[in-house]
Image (spheres, helix red, strand yellow):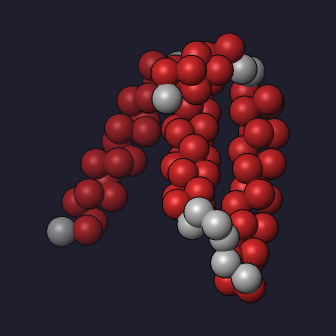
Amino acid sequence: MAKENLQLDTMEIPDLLAEITSMQNEYQQMKFDHAIRGLANPLEIRQLRRKIARFNTEVRQRELAAMAPEQLMMRTKIVERRRRQRR
């Protein structure tokens, strides 16, 4: 897992998005293959799904880091409003 984190740090956002798309296509294919004939190791599906989530998290963290303080403040207000509406 540590090697993967190093890989994420060196990649640019467009590269991350391209990799996410590639992994999502692979995930769909794996799900289809598993439904039709089964996989030798079904845990690969879970591992790939978690890897996609890690990449998505990295992209979102970078988006938040690039936001201006005003945008972050507005985002906080929106989140609070949604929390109040759920109650």
Residue at 76%, 39% in the rendered image: 19
Residue 67 picture location, percent across and down: 55, 23
Residue at 43%, 39% in the rendered image: 75
Residue 2 picture location, percent across and down: 49, 21
Q: Is residue 66 visible?
A: no
- Is residue 25 shown above or below 14? below
Q: Is residue 4 visible?
A: yes
68 and 8: which is toward the camera? 8
Quarter of the figure with the C terminus: bottom left
Instruction: Quadrant for residue 73, please give it.
Output: top left
Tell me: 37 left or right of 3: right
Residue at 74%, 21% in the rendered image: 12
- Is residue 34 shown above or below 3? below
- Is residue 42 shown above or below 63? below
Residue reaching furthest left?
Answer: 87
Residue reaching furthest bottom?
Answer: 36
Tell me: 12 left or right of 73: right
Residue 30 picture location, percent across and down: 72, 66
Residue at 56%, 20% in the rendered image: 3
Residue 58 picture location, percent across and down: 56, 31
Residue reaching furthest front?
Answer: 40
19 and 43: which is toward the camera? 43
- Is residue 36 shown above or below 41? below
Instruction: Quadrant for residue 37, please give it.
Output: bottom right
Instruction: Quadrant for residue 8, please give it.
Output: top right
